[in-house]
Image (cartoon, rainbow, N blue to C red):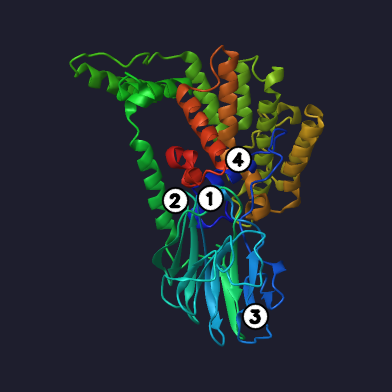
Amino acid sequence: MNNLPEYLQETSYAEQIASYHAVASPNKPLLPPPELPSFWNDKDKCELIEVVNGGLDVRFVGPGRGNDKDAASVRANCPIPRGVGVYYFEVEIVSKGAEGFIGIGFCKLRVPLNRLPGWESDSWGYHGDDGHSFCCQGTGKQYGPKFTTGDIVGCAINFRTLTGFYTKNGVDLGIAFRDLPISRSDLYPSVGLRTMGEHVRVNFGQKPFVYDVEQYMREEKAKMYGLTNTVPTKILFGDDDVMHVVQSLVGSYLSHNGYVETARAFAEVVKSEHEALPTGALPKEFSSKEDAAAVNRQRIWNAVVRGDIEHGIKLTNTFFPDVLTAEENVEVMFKLRCREFVKLIMAVAEATSPTAKPDKDMPDVAMGEEVDLVGSPAPTDSTKLLGAVLEFGKKLREWFPSPEHRDALQEIFSLIAYPDPRTEPRVASLIDPAHDAAVAEELNSAILVSSGGTKFSALERLVQSTVVKCNQLRDEGNGAVGVVNVKADFLG
C-alpha cells in the first residue's frame, strides 16, 4: 500500500492489494494483484532508443535521418490494471532535441515499436511538435499546445468513461480520445522519439505529480456514487421505509458486536424520534435488548484490540470455554498466538531501544502460562525477554505442527533477526496493529457462531456482498467500479 501513488490509495485496486497482504493464512490467494507500470521495458523497445536511469529515462540514439523511418517507441514493463479506475503518469521533456518529435500515450502489446504512439492501430498518442492527438492512424487532429524542453506532460485513462486525456504542466487539456476498447485488451504506457538529442523522463508515481490527480479521483468517486444515488429507493427496499431499514441495520450491528452502551444510547434516540411521529412505531425488528454475553464479548474484543492477547484468551476460556478448543476455530487460536508472539518481539525491541524507559516503567508482557510468565512480574531485561520469545516460539511449533502453520510461523519468526522491527519496512505488515482488530473480529464471530448466532450482522453481510460484487465486476474488466473502495469509502 505504501508504494501505491496517492491517488490510488482508496480504490478497488488498493483493496485488492490489502486483501492479498493480509495476515498469513493457508487460505491466502495464490495469485497476487496485477502490478502497476513502474519503468520502461528495455526488452520491449525499438533499437533506435536507449533506456537508462533505472528504466525511467529514454533517449534517442539514432541514427537520425530526418524522416518517419527514424521513429522509435518503448512500452512500460507491464500493462495498466483495469481495476484502478483511473490511471495516470507524467513525462518530463528533459530535452526536445533537434525537432521535438516526441509522442506520449499508450498502446496494446502487439503494436510495432518503429512508429510513434498513435500512428498505428491500437495505439494512441499526443505529439509535441504540432500539439496533435493521434488515434490509431497517421493523421492527427488539433488537440493541445506544443510541448518542449522543461514541460511536463501527463497522460490519463479513465476506465469508467472509456476516455483518455492529457495535462501540460498541471493543466488539464481536456478529453483527447473516447470509446477506448479497454475491456478487450490490455494497454501499456508508451513514449516515442524521432530526432537526435530527444530525452524524456517518466514519473509512474514514484514522486508526487504536477497535476492534482488526487482531486480528479475524488471527483470521479463522487460521480460514481452520485449514479448509485439516482436509483429509486423502492427498487432497493420495496415498501419498507428507508430510514427504518437503516436504523434496524445499525441497531443490529451494534448489538451483534457487543457495543452494549452504544446500542442502548442509539435505541433511545431512535425511540424518541419515532414517538414524535404520527405512527409512533419503532422500526421493524429493532431491539435494544441487553445481552450479558454481549458485554463479555466486548471485554474480549477490547483486550485483543489493545494487544493484551493472553487476557483476551483467558476471558474467552472463562465465559465461552468451548470456543477456542473447537476444531473449527484452530485458525482463530493460531492467529491469536501469532499476535501474542509479535507483542513479545515488540517488547524486546522496546527494552533494547536507546530511548527505552527504566525497567520499572516497562509495561507487563502478556504471555502464556506455559512459559511461566502469567501472574508474575514481566522480565526486567532484554535477555529474559528474548528467552521468553524463544521459549514461546518452541511452544508455537508444538501447538501448530501442520505444514501450513509452519510456513506462517516461519514468517513471524523472521522478526527475531531485526534489532528493531519497528524501523524495518520489509516487516511492517507483520507488526501492523490493524491485525489485532482483525483477529478480534474473527474471535467475536467464532463466539457468536458457537452460541447459535450468525457469524456476521446483517449490515456486515450487506457490506461483504457489496465488496464481492464490486470485486467481481472489477475482475470482469468493468472499469467503473475501479474508483470504489467500499471499506475505505464507508468504513474508514
Q: Calculate the distance from the C-alpha at mark 4 to the C-alpha at mark 3.
A: 46 Å
Q: Are discs 2 and 3 less than 8 Å apart at CB?
A: no
Q: Is 373 drawn above or below residue 454 in the view shown? A: below
Please report whichever mark, 4 or 3, sits nearer to the chain's N-terminal start. Answer: 4
Residue with the mark numbered 1: 84
Q: Secondary structure at mark 3?
A: helix
- Mark 4 vs 3: CB contact within 8 A: no
Type of the residue with mark 1: Val
Q: Is residue 352 visible?
A: no
In what element is the residue under mark 2?
loop
The picture places residue 449, in percent across and down from the top left corner, at: 58, 16
Label ID, residue 298: none
Q: Is residue 214 visible?
A: yes
Amino acid on which disc 2 is placed: Thr
Q: Is residue 49 above or below residue 108?
A: below
Q: Residues within 10 Å of mark 3 (few under 14, many from 20)?
A: many
List x then y, in percent, for residue 179: 47, 53
Alpha carbon distance from label 1 to label 3:
35 Å
Q: Nearer the viewer, mark 1 or mark 3?
A: 3
Mark 2 sits on what residue?
A: 161
Residue 355: x and y in percent read: 60, 56
Structural distance between the alpha carbons of marks 1 and 2: 13 Å
250 vs 161, nearest the viewer: 161
Residue at image mark 3: 70
Q: Is 371 placed left or right of 183 in the picture?
A: right
User: Mark 4 or 1, which is nearer the eye?
Assistant: 1
